Amino acid sequence: MGYELAQAARDAVESILDPTMHWSYYRAKKTEPQIYSRRVSGFPFHVIYFFHEAEIMVVVCAHERRRPGYWEYRLND
């Protein structure tokens, strides 16, 4: 099961690179950076990320229901 989760998370991150796809906003505030969420297929996880210049910065692969938003402090670093 661990291998499958790791592969599904990798697939989610790779799908973020596809310029034809558009993923959900994590929050719709007009703050920088704009945070996006990509669901990990088959698991109750989301990849949370934002764009910084020419890079995609992955903040966390977070469980959908356990401690929502616990990682938001990372945006200040």
Image (cartoon, rainbow, N blue to C red):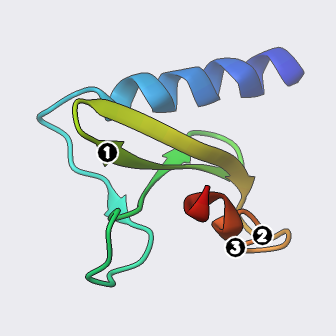
Depth check, front residue: 11 or 42: 11
Q: Is residue 37 left or right of residue 61?
A: left
The percent position of residue 15, horizontal first and vertical second, equals: 36, 29
Label 1 is placed on what type of residue? Phe
First in sequence: mark 1 or mark 2? 1
| Residue annotated with mark 2 | 70
Q: Quadrant of residue 19?
A: top left
Depth check, front residue: 36 or 71: 71
Give SS at disc 2: loop
Q: Is residue 30 left or right of residue 25?
A: left
Q: Quadrant of residue 67?
A: bottom right
Marks 1/3: CA–CA distance = 19 Å
Q: Residue at x 75, y 28 (%)?
A: 5
The percent position of residue 38, horizontal first and vertical second, equals: 46, 49
First in sequence: mark 1 or mark 3? 1
- Give yes or no for contact between labels 3 and 2 (Cβ–Cβ under 8 Å): yes
Label 3 is placed on what type of residue? Gly
Q: Quadrant of residue 27?
A: bottom left
Total marks in image: 3
Q: Is residue 6 visible?
A: yes
The percent position of residue 16, horizontal first and vertical second, equals: 34, 34
Disc number placed over residue 69 in the picture, else none: 3
**Rendered-image quadrant of the C terminus:** bottom right
Label 2 is placed on what type of residue? Tyr
Mark 3 surroundings within 10 Å by alpha-carbon count, few (fewer than 14), some (14 through 19), many (20 or more) = few
- Give yes or no for contact between labels 1 and 3 (Cβ–Cβ under 8 Å): no
**Looking at the image, residue 32 lies above or below residue 31:** above
**Looking at the image, residue 38 lies above or below residue 53:** below
Q: Residue at x 81, y 15 (%)?
A: 3
| Residue annotated with mark 1 | 51
